[in-house]
Amino acid sequence: MIRYVHPALLAELQRGATTLCTLLLIRPVTPGMSPYGLTDTNQSVRYNPGTGEVLFSAPIGFEASLVEAQADLSVANAEARSLMPVYDVPVSEELINAGQLDYAEFALYLVNYEDLTTGRHITLQEGTIGKVSVRDDGLSFINELRGLAAQLKQEVCSKYTKTCRAIEGTQELGSLLPGPQVRRDWCGVDFTVYLKTSTVSAVGLENTLNFRIDPGDVDSEWDVNAFVPGRVIFTTGRNAGRTLEIMGNTADGWITLRHEAGFPIEVDDELEYRVGCTFIARDAEKGCLAHAGSGWIDVFKGYPDIPTENADQLSTPGAAVGPAGGGGTSVPYATVEA
């Protein structure tokens, strides 16, 4: 991998300088979180890599694994281990477990700590952090460092599926409809029209999964699993900004989430909720036909009429499986045919 080296720093490397250290700059993607830095030397370093001065903390430090680039663009599985901070650095076990630090951008620099002129560094690696996890001892945490080449390994082609591949509520680039805009496999349906607002009035024993909305907001639309599939968007409280899937609901306002909220849900947290989509083309109750009407064929991102008789398509619902020592079997259809 070709890297630019500042001429003065190159001269010091050629002389065998012993005052070198590495700096790890992390830019969280979570709104409201500022960039922070870590260093592997024994004193904190203030340095401006060209995007603004950052304090690279030494008390928690970091220990990086081997930094390498593979010719086949495979992920090098580099890691940075750090002590769990007590002060100065905006990192805590609670934030890590909540996923607030996942998928941040990072850059790893080599500098001479005796001459920290702006831009006087070598960029050893940059990319995105995968999962941030706490080690079993509870005293340290690990950042998965994924280089830029890892993004080239991501799938960019659409697959043939009977169900819709779009994320509900997404819009094509330039659309005037509300919702996130994406380059491909956009939904095209405005799901904001289904949004309802409420507040948390009670929390269940599993306070990250189960809660009840204000009984005054339970209207005639509420029935058992009436909002399944569906989404909850917290607008205030510690989970503000998080969108979570509804796994079940009762007729009297209790909601159970499919995955845990990052932080405990608390009484008086404000939220929005709505029904979702089953991603099945001709489902007139909660599928594409229900949300897009007769124009569903124009927005459906799937192939609902893929033949299911082909014995080779084992992953296709309803496809026959050839006899193999015990007769023929089949993969069952979903309850509602696409």
Image (cartoon, rainbow, N blue to C red):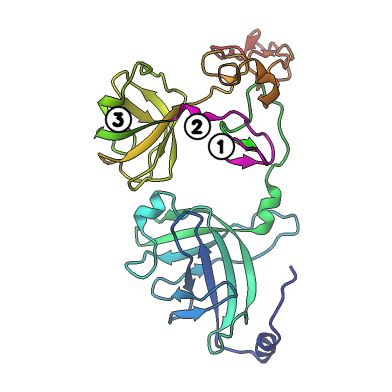
- Residue 46 position in % (x across, y down): 48, 80
Q: Which residue is mark 1?
A: 178
| Farthest residue, direction bottom | 15
Kindly check if marks 2 and 3 are in contact, taking CB atoms under 8 A apart as contact: no
- Between 334 and 182, the one lying in front of the other is 182
- In the rendered image, which residue does mark 3 sit on? 213
Are the residues tagged 1 and 2 within 8 Å (C-beta)?
yes
User: Who's the residue at 62% across and 41% down the image?
Assistant: 181
Report whether 233 appears left or right of 113. Answer: left
Q: Mark 2: few, some, or many residues within 10 Å (few <14, many ≥20)?
A: some
Q: What's the CA distance linking mark 3 and mark 1?
A: 25 Å
Tag 1 or tag 3, which sits nearer the N-term? 1
Taking the spot 67% from the left edge, 52% from the top edge, the residue there is: 151
Q: Is residue 335 magenta?
A: no
Q: Which mark is residue 85?
A: none
Badge 2 element:
helix
Please tell me which residue is depicted at 69% across the width and 82% down the height of the picture: 6
Magenta stretch in the rendered image: 173-195
Q: Disc 2 or 3, which lies upstream in sequence?
A: 2
Residue occupied by mark 2: 192
Mark 3: secondary structure:
strand
Q: Is residue 313 above or below residue 131?
A: above
Extreme-front residue of the structure: 176
Confirm whether the magenta stretch covers residue 175.
yes
Q: CA distance from mark 2 to mark 3?
A: 19 Å
Comes first in the chain, label 1 or label 2:
1
- Mark 3 residue type: Ile
